[in-house]
Image (cartoon, grey):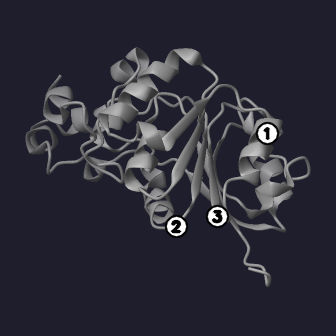
Amino acid sequence: MIVRRAAGDRVMAGPFQGMALHLSPGSNRDHLSYLLGTQELELHSTIEAIICGGHESIINIGAADGYYAVGFARAMPSARVIAFEALPQHHALLWRTAEANNVADKISLHGFCTPADLEEVLKTAGARPLVFCDIEGGEMSLLDNLAIPELERAEILVETHDDMAPGCSATLCRRFAHTHTITSILAQPRRLSDFPSRQLPNVAKWMPRAAVELMNERRTSVQEWLHLVPLVRKAD
């Protein structure tokens, strides 16, 4: 209640600070880290670099409530966002958040993303597309650069799920080893210093354990992300 009252349905910190956010019932109950701005804190420096990276298109696969799709659209006025979300019940929330942030005209929303869909979108995505992917294990079959050669010029930030698709991270690293530099990002335990204490000083001061627990993302296994950046080619 304290967080929701202080946030007023806006992200309090991080790269999407100030974004109006309408969460699904599950996220609203279990993931106050979205409102705190500490959700996937490990990615913040990478997200900030992407925002400054001059991408013409952001392809968000697994857009869910729209946190990243709307966040990127809001932070990158010159980019277009193509969002895919397989669960139609999330679509209304994504549009609600997009409209609250005045970026609905910058986002196109689609359902389940097939390899053919991704290939088609990449062909018209401009010279510097970004693929941001979180699809619960489906990334191993979708992000196949043999089937979709256009992926070789895309920057990719993907949440891997080896618990659901064993060998997923290693497979993706092997596929893109010759075309991208690859950085592995591992989830880290939250510390009190991660809490947005400037916005909620009394929580951090008087309830430090609760402050850390509020940032709990309810993960059941060690989480990894891969950041793949295309190698510079002579033709570029």
Residue 199 percent across, percent down from the top left: 14, 46
Viewport quadrant of the N terminus: top left
Circle 2 SS class: loop
Contact between marks 2 and 3 (CB within 8 A): the answer is yes
Query: Foreground mark, 3 or 1?
Result: 3
Name the outermost residue toward the right: 146
Viewport quadrant of the C terminus: bottom right
Seen from the viewer's position, the closer of residues 1 and 202 is: 1
Q: Amino acid at mark 2?
A: Gly
- Location of residue 52 with respect to 37 vertically, above or below: below
Could you give the CA–CA distance between mark 1 and mark 2, rounded to whole angstroms?
25 Å
Quadrant location of residue 138?
A: top right
User: Residue sitting at 24 percent across and 30 percent down?
Assistant: 9
Name the outermost residue toward the front: 105
Q: Could you classify mark 1 by the number of other residues whose Cα lies within 10 Å: few (under 14), some (14-19), or many (20 or more)?
A: some
Residue 169 percent across, percent down from the top left: 74, 47
The answer to whether residue 175 is visible is yes
Q: In the displayed structure, does residue 104 sit left or right of residue 214?
A: right
Q: Which residue is mark 2?
A: 54
Q: Which residue is mark 1?
A: 142
Q: In the displayed structure, does residue 191 sit left or right of residue 122?
A: left
Q: Amino acid at mark 3?
A: Arg
- Location of residue 60 with respect to 136 vertically, above or below: below
Circle 3 SS class: loop
Q: Which residue is mark 3?
A: 128
Query: Foreground mark, 1 or 2?
Result: 2
Could you give the CA–CA distance between mark 2 and mark 3, rounded to whole angstroms?
8 Å
Q: Amino acid at mark 1?
A: Leu
